[in-house]
Amino acid sequence: MAGFTCSAADLRPLLGTAANATAAAEYICNGFDTVSNKLVAATYAIDNTYLLFSAYLVFSMQLGFAMLCAGSVRAKNTMNIMLTNVLDAATGSLFYYLFGFALAFGSPSNGFVGRHFFGLEKYPSPSGDYSFFLYQWSFAIAAAGITSGSIAERTQFVAYLIYSSFLTGLVYPIVSHWFWSTDGWASPVREGHLLFGSGVIDFAGSGVVHMVGGIAGLWGALVEGPRMGRFDGDGKPVSLRGHSGTLVVLGTFLLWFGWYGFNPGSFLSILKTYEHTNDSSYYGQWSAIGRTAVTTTIAGSSAALTTLFGKRLLTGHWNVTDVCNGLLGGFAAVTGGCSVVDPWAAIICGFIAAWVLIGCNKLAEMVKYDDPLEAAQLHGGCGAWGIIFTALFAKKDYVNEIYPGKPGRPHGLLMGGGARLLAAHLIQILVVIGWVSVTMGSVFWLLKVFGLLRISADAEMAGLDVTSHGGLAYAYHDENNDQSVKNSFPMANMDSSNA
């Protein structure tokens, strides 16, 4: 309808030779143009509403991150970790508004960095509306939230503010420009030459979001070192269990819910038909969105069940925290290829993601790496697997639907599409690791050099809630607190009468 026009000159001969034929033709065409414009406006309204709703879902994941983080740390650090999650969103809002969005999507630009829309100047534009900015902002703060879990329970508050600003204002936006912008050097929607004839198909961000957040967290935890007591004198790991399995499960379900905005929402619009199909009356982008929700669900569920039985075999326990992390690992892995794979392939994705997470956690213990949320292992490790998974299982028909206009575009290696997509995806893994390591590794190293990264040993023993935030989140008794800590920080063991 939007591409159909009405011409009074063409219509007049069909109305005969009546004296008022010209007036009638003009009247009909004016009416048709009015209806056509209304339909075009309705299409924009529907698509923008869909994108706004998806942005709201992705933003709700911040609550999931907060609950998951709170349940995964010890009670004496609960207020600290929840406040960092709030400020990841607040700080990220300002820096993504001022700098990040422009660096990511400021077209026209070069292949490496955007150059327009700083502070949303001259935006909205033909390239997007406010709904697009809000949606991309929700992704940026998600990356920052991932990193905060890796350095929990031992980090100065000012360090969170600095790294979050840098990550959302510079590091993440440039990566998203490379792989998602219409100008990005590795983007699958780039005009002109595509990397290996394909570009990188990282649909919702296994690499752009999850690997960036996970690798940033990896460097933060490596530079900072493990928490006190995480490894004994012989180097053997000591479990520092989170204080609330209830909050972990609540956070996991909130993240699961939000993922339906994260993955299906990445289509950015819903009212679009796939005209090359014979069933376009009922099959269109709305069908692909539904399929994406299904593959997301299947991958997470497969990973959860694999983790359940895998950890039972390895440890003899049915551990709810491990299952929740496995579920999230499956989601992180399928995020990159959720739109271009079949549901059966998502089962394989989740199954392998669970073992990737288990293996990364085992390796972390061997090298004495401490990540309270397993964020680097989960988002970095499973995200990297997800990038490879997409290059293996992307289906030709789905790739052509979602990335049209490039006949012969490579698809999954195991689906008969050759190795070019895999080559592009291996490059993505390498450049994400390299870029984030250089930038965020330097930030955390400089914070350490200037004494702004790690808290003191006494403060770490007492907990950040007391030493930095004025009191505890709960009235509780910590059996591990010794008398010296009680004397140094009298609030550390408040009884219920003082709560």
Image (tube, rainbow, N blue to C red):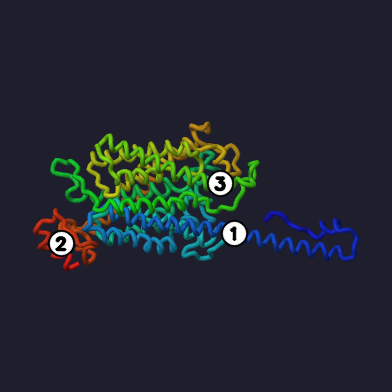
**Place of residue 448 in the rendered image (x, y in percent of width and height, measured from the top left):** 24, 55
The residue at which mark 2 appears reads as: 493
Residue appearing at x 64%, y 43% in the figure: 279
Residue type beneath disc 1:
Tyr
Q: Secondary structure at mark 3?
A: helix
Which numbered disc, 3 or 2, marks the residue that appears first in the sequence? 3
Vertical placement of 250 versus 381: above or below? below
Residue type beneath disc 3:
Ser
Residue 497 versus residue 357: which sits nearer the camera?
Answer: 497
**Residue 430 visible in the picture:** no
Dots 2 and 1: beta carbons under 8 Å?
A: no
Residue 428 versus residue 400: which sits nearer the camera?
Answer: 400
Q: Nearer the viewer, mark 2 or mark 1?
A: 2
Rendered image: mark on residue 267:
none
Residue appearing at x 25%, y 59% in the figure: 156
Dots 1 and 3: beta carbons under 8 Å?
A: no
Residue type beneath disc 2:
Asn
Q: CA distance from mark 3 to mark 2?
A: 56 Å
**Place of residue 258 in the rendered image (x, y in percent of width and height, measured from the top left):** 42, 53
Q: CA distance from mark 1 to mark 3?
A: 19 Å
The residue at which mark 1 appears reads as: 44
Which numbered disc, 1 or 3, marks the residue that appears first in the sequence? 1
Dots 3 and 2: beta carbons under 8 Å?
A: no
Identify the image quadrant of residue 88: bottom left
The residue at which mark 3 appears reads as: 287
Looking at the figure, which quarter contains the N terminus?
Answer: bottom right
Number of residues whose C-alpha sits closer than 10 Å to that of mark 3, classed few (under 14), some (14–19) or many (20 or more): some
Residue appearing at x 42%, y 38% in the figure: 349
Q: Secondary structure at mark 1?
A: helix
Which numbered disc, 2 or 1, marks the residue that appears first in the sequence? 1
**Place of residue 79 in the rendered image (x, y in percent of width and height, measured from the top left):** 26, 61
Residue 1 versus residue 405: which sits nearer the camera?
Answer: 1
